[in-house]
Image: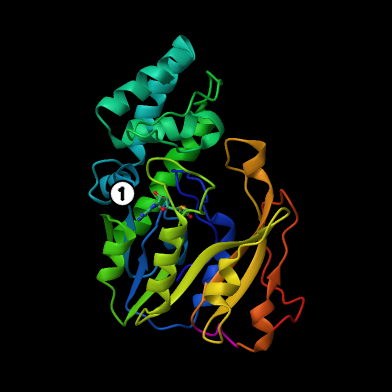
Amino acid sequence: MRSGPLVPPIKCQGIKTKLVDEIRHLVSGLEFERWVEPFCGSCVVALNLQPPKALLCDTNIHIINFYRDIQNGKIDHLVVRDYLREEGAVLSSRGEEHFYTVRERFNSSPNSMDFLFLNRSCFNGVMRFNKRGRFNVPFCRKTDRFSAAYITKISNQVLAIASVISRFDWKFRVSEFTETFAGLNRGDLVYADPPYAGRHVDYFNSWSQEDEKQLGRKLASLPCKFVLSSWHSNEFRSNSSMDKLWGGEKFRIFTKEHFYHVGSTEDLRHPMIEALVTNFPARGSTKLERARQITLPLNNESVPSLRTDMDAG
Ligand SMILES: C[S@@+](CC[C@H](N)C(=O)[O-])C[C@H]1O[C@@H](n2cnc3c(N)ncnc32)[C@H](O)[C@@H]1O
């Protein structure tokens, strides 16, 4: 598996770019045949860990189609560069009206390029769909959004991820998590990153307490190892599922403060203590690891290495 951050061209709420190093640390040294993500989102975790074989699933058909289009060569960095130059120039001259033209075009006939355009030029870079599954985020209001430097950055991101995807045996699938779980085997290693209940609700993210419980039951009875991402607490409340579902001896909980930059409101951009739950001891595990706390200075882009600072185990 590779080290170093690789940033996907698609952004989504709850993207785990800043947890990649910790997840890598937790799974390093484990032997497994297939990496499975029932909620792959931007795929940032798989793209960085680079397992040779993976099943990457999500209910969001647009994300899955985007990765499939890259995998089958339908789009590459040059196609992306030319498309963004063309559409970016129209955006500069016509202004936000053009954003809404592309949004309407995408909603009546979804395609990966318009999806990328909207994702990288909408307000706050959020991905939100209304009850009818239509992309409904407004424009970011920067008509010169697609500067030459920004286009180069995005097409380089496409180039980098295309080169990763082409090297490995990865499958991208539109799938409900229940369906993904039904096909799991002993040799799989699951990284589950479900929506956080009540946090980002939209067409692809209607996550209920019942979903949460069902996922908990499925994970607890898995024949293979898993890492679950969840929230532990924020300044207002703590996640009661942490102790209820994962308080037992079989599981371990690791926490890290994480500051969300992607969010439609200030409210969603508060610091959050993230939790990583596993059903296996991490490398060199001791009781200490149950309380492994990794702190990140707010707004700091760099991810420090793991640090054990307290023993609550
Ligand atoms: C927190 S995001 C995953 C983020 C991802 N790990 C990343 O770093 O980009 C949760 C994902 O779950 C997907 N999702 C929501 N409900 C689902 C369900 N019932 N089954 C499968 N995927 C679902 C959403 O479309 C979303 O992409």
- Residue appearing at x 42%, y 47% in the figure: 205
- Please give left or right for residue 311 compared with residue 71 in the image: right
Please provide the residue range marked out in magenta.
280-284
Q: Main secondary structure of the magenta part?
A: loop
Q: Toward the viewer: 16 or 133?
A: 133
Asked if the beta carbon under badge 1 is closer than 8 A to the nearest atom of ligand 1, the reply is: no
Q: Amino acid at mark 1?
A: Ile
* Residue 213 image position (x, y, % from top left): 44, 65
Q: Name, please, the residue furthest toward the top.
A: 94
Which residue is more in the foreground, 178 or 99? 178
Q: Is residue 211 above or below residue 83?
A: below
Determine which quarter of the picture holds residue 136: top left
The relative height of residue 4 versus residue 27 in the rendered view (above or below) is above
Q: Residue at x 27, y 32 (%)?
A: 110
SS state under label 1: helix
In the image, residue 266 above or below residue 102: below
**x then y, percent, for residue 48:** 47, 61
Task: Tell me what residue is drawn at x 58 percent, y 79 percent.
Answer: 247
Tell me, yes or no, whether the highlighted magenta stretch contains residue 267. no
Dot 1, how many residues are within 10 Å of its Cα: few (below 14), some (14-19), or many (20+)?
A: many
Quadrant that contains the N terminus:
bottom left
Left/right placement of residue 213 relative to residue 249 reads left
x 68%, y 47%: residue:
270
Q: Position of residue 131 (x, y in %)?
A: 36, 34
Which residue matches tag 1? 64
Quarter of the image containing the C terminus?
bottom right
Is residue 26 shown above or below 179? below
